[in-house]
């Protein structure tokens, strides 16, 4: 990472819409930031961007099957 901040660490987490609470999202942001700090050093903290992107119901799939919250929650 350059000192100028040109190459900021960036993580884009895709999660089902409405599945996580605000506190759970905060925990994800904090833990991913800490991982980047461990990897790149303390200077990365101020420049680390974590985007928690909520995907609408039925907006993604695996193995040719559309996933729903019920499927992801084991139902």
Image: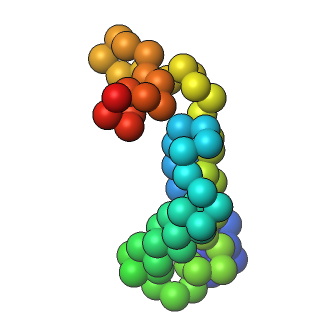
Tell me, what colour scheme is on the image?
rainbow
In the image, residue 70 lies at what x, y percent? 43, 28
Q: Which residue is drawn at 47% across and 24% down?
A: 68
Foreground of the two, 7 or 56: 56
Foreground of the two, 22 or 6: 22
In the image, residue 46 lies at what x, y percent? 66, 80
Quarter-wise, where is residue 30 in the image? bottom right
In the image, residue 58 lies at what x, y percent? 54, 20
Left or right: 73 as drawn, with respect to 37: left
Foreground of the two, 7 or 52: 52
Q: Residue at x 60, y 57 (%)?
A: 21
* Vertical placement of residue 72 versus 20, above or below: above
Residue positioned most to the front: 75
Viewer can see residue 46: yes
* Vertical placement of residue 7 versus 4, above or below: above
Foreground of the two, 73 or 36: 73
Residue positioned most to the bottom: 42
Q: Residue at x 61, y 42 (%)?
A: 18
Quarter-wise, where is residue 53 in the image? top right
In the image, residue 71 lies at what x, y percent? 38, 27
Q: Quadrant of the C terminus?
A: top left
Q: Which residue is drawn at 61% across and 38% down?
A: 17
* Vertical placement of residue 19 versus 57, above or below: below
């Amino acid at each position: 990472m350059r000192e100028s901040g040109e190459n900021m660490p960036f993580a884009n987490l895709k999660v089902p819409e409405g599945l996580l609470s605000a506190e759970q999202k905060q925990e994800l942001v904090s833990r991913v930031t800490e991982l980047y700090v461990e990897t790149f050093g303390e200077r990365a903290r101020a420049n680390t961007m974590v985007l928690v992107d909520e995907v609408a119901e039925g907006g993604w799939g695996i193995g040719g099957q559309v996933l729903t919250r019920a499927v992801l929650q084991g139902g």
